[in-house]
Image (cartoon, rainbow, N blue to C red):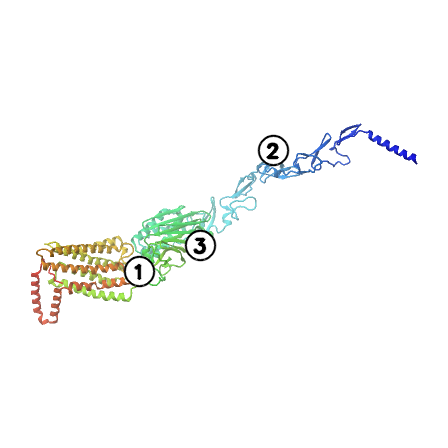
Amino acid sequence: MTSRGNLLMLALHLSLAMVLSYPSCPIGYNIKDQECVDYDECATDEDYPEANPCGENAACLNTEGSFYCKCEDGYISSSQSVTFSAGTPATCKDINECVESGDICGPNAKCHNAIPLYSCICDAGFISSSGAESFRRSENVTCRDIDECQEENPCGQNAACFNTPGSYYCVCNTGFGLRSGKSHFSGNAEQCEDTCVIDKTICGNGTCHRGDNGHYCACHAGFTNYGNKESRCTVLNCDVFKHEDSLEEKLPGVQDVVSQLASSCLELTESESPTELVGEGLLQRLLSMVDGLLSNVAFNDNRKVSAFLDVVENALRLIGPFIKPPGTNRSNTHTDLELWVRRGAVLPQGAVTLSSEHAQLDIQSETAAGEASFYPGFTTVSLLSYKNLEDSTDGFFGGMKPPYNKTFKINSKVVTATVSNRDTSHLKEPVILTFYHLKQTNESNHTCVYWDSTEEGGAWSPRGCSVVESNAEYTVCSCNHLSSFAVLMALYEIEDTFELQLITWVGLSLSLLCLFICILTFSLVRSIQSPRTTIHLHLCISLFIANLVFLAGISRTENRTGCAVVAGLLHYFYLASFCWMCLEGVQLFRMVVLVFNTTFKSLYMMAGGYGVPAVIVAISAIVNAKGYGTKRHCWLNLEGAFIWSFFGPACLIIIVNIFFFLITVWKLAQKFSSLNPDLNNLRKIKAFTITAVAQLCVLGTMWIFGCFQFEGGTAAMSYLFTILSSLQGVLLFVMHCLLSKQVREEYGSFLSSFCAPQKKRYSEFSSSQSSKAQTSKSIQNTGESHI
């Protein structure tokens, strides 16, 4: 047993000795033939060929005593280093070249990432220069455009092909189009078809034909495309121009222009190939016609106003399309016109603003053009301002009722607004009109109106219009239709009360009676006749005729011509009375200053008393004939400065009289203080002067109150004016007849002879003797009596 253990121990020692007798090698080496040689860790194991000490997508590179790993092309280590050892946790991941290098494929190509590497594919419409479907940048391949138009008929026979980089598009030939309405197409989704087939309403009320230059429209009778054959045919009403004879009766001087408009209109609506109008020339003729009418004719009939405005509105619609874009501006004597024109197959968009000196129009171009289905290929907007039509249209207010104790008055210029849109009776969007006031006032009592030709032959109407803003300077109106427009203002109206009428009738009747007695007295009583009584005679005649005409015709305004005649007569005879009053002042001056030849010649007196007012009235009538007669009274027009054709001379005469009276009084005072004064004659002249001054106060004061008669809130002035004007004849009778001792004696003698016929011969003898005695006592041939 012991021997066995020893044997075992001996074997272990021998084995250990053998092991310890072999040499040792470092890591990465193996012993071969008792030598350490490099161990190739990258060598492929025949038993495990897929085994790779570097992992997937990496290459193993052996080194002396070791090895390292490197990622294959298209991969990168997770540690971002170029190489790594197997002992590290690094791995190889794919590189996305399409992200890392944005333009790696060049223009007109797209990058597609692969594992590993990438590939480039040309965009649609391009092909690689090598002809291969895919490529890489390193191959120096580019993508070039494919010209699709070189292929056989890609657009079809009715379209033209246009190549573009990477694609192409097709445009239909003239006379053809796409059902989608697009301007071009590509591919086979659509094909070009005949325009007349695609849109059978393209010509509106006309027949569509295809010609060499595209489609054209042959309009039916009563419709026109204004000479533009490709445009839609729209209705054109020529009836307003056809009745030239009836228009000539209403509006003298329009026949030539209306006849030309009618022939042009008929050619446009009846001819299949109408000639294009010369718009500029026709527009100038129209404006000249309007100027002629407004300068020569007073529209005293609302039917004439309606005919005039209808002709102008329709003429502007007819002429507008033949004006070259962008339009025109015209300023004539009585009109201001701005005309805006746009052409094109597409409806215009945006706001349009037209303006003149007295008004402004704001409208959307879509509203002016109208519905797209009726669009004629053009859009026009016009604003015509009349400089003096407000007087002719004032007073025609139809059923409009002004506020209590007020009356309507036009406070703006009349304007006509037109558009090419034929349906303007109710616009989708309202138009904005701004009117500048003729008379600035702080009262917010303005009304926007339009001229309605269908209402009682023509009248102003507020229907469809409203006030947006109003101040002292202007009023802004909003209207949902188009026509001719203006702004009305409610003015204070002096009521013709019963009391004033009663005072006028009674006072004027009494004055006429007294003036008639004065005329008989100064013309028949020889004992008092002298140059001064001659002046009094014609003064009374002038006032008598003026009062008679006033009483009979001051309110007869229904006939404008007759009313103007009445106003002219009143103007003349009231001025004549002032002139005769001035002659009396001159006569008194001559009596005091001149010693000899103190009398006037009759011819000179007639020229001064009747000739001067005749000249003033004639000049006034020539300058402004429309100034005679107003809507309420047959008197001078109070608007403007025309009333000063009366007040001016009257004020001048009053100033001249005052001047002569002051000199006369001064000379009288000197003569009274002289050494040997002629007291009788001086007292007589003094009395004459006092009478003349009193007469001037009566007549002059009356017209001072008359100046305030026509302003608001002057009821007291109205009564004072009415009383003085009605009783001036009575006052003259009192001053010149009843206060004259000699005239009273003549009246007494006349009444005595009338009441006692048996004493007639004695009275005649006494009158004769008295007349002779009075004549012998006359001084400087005055023959006047004391007061």
Give the camera-side residue of 396 and 87. Answer: 87
Q: Position of residue 210 (x, y in %)?
A: 48, 46
Q: State the residue position of label 3.
A: 429
* Residue 140 - label: 2
- Is 138 displayed left or right of 510 in the figure? right
- Is 472 displayed left or right of 751 in the figure? right
Q: Position of residue 600 (x, y in %)?
A: 13, 55
Q: Position of residue 730 (x, y in %)?
A: 19, 64
Q: How many numbered marks appear?
A: 3
- Counting other residues with Cα less than 10 Å from the Cα at mark 2, is it few (<14), some (14-19), or many (20 or more)? few
Distance of label 3 from label 1 (alpha carbons): 40 Å
Q: Amino acid at mark 2?
A: Asn
Q: Is residue 565 visible?
A: no
Tell me the quarter of the image containing the N terminus.
top right
Q: Nearer the viewer, mark 3 or mark 1?
A: 1
| Position above or below: 86 against 270 | above
Distance of label 1 from label 2 (alpha carbons): 99 Å
- Counting other residues with Cα less than 10 Å from the Cα at mark 1, is it few (<14), some (14-19), or many (20 or more)? few
Q: Amino acid at mark 1?
A: Gly
Of mark 2 and mark 3, the one earlier in the sequence is 2
| Position above or below: 658 against 83 | below
Q: Amino acid at mark 3?
A: Glu
- Is 583 displayed left or right of 453 in the figure? left
Secondary structure at badge 2 equals: loop
Q: Is residue 4 visible?
A: yes
* Residue 712 - label: 1
Of mark 1 and mark 2, the one earlier in the sequence is 2
Circles 1 and 2 in contact, beta carbons < 8 Å: no
Tell me the quarter of the image containing the C terminus.
bottom left
Q: Nearer the viewer, mark 1 or mark 2?
A: 1
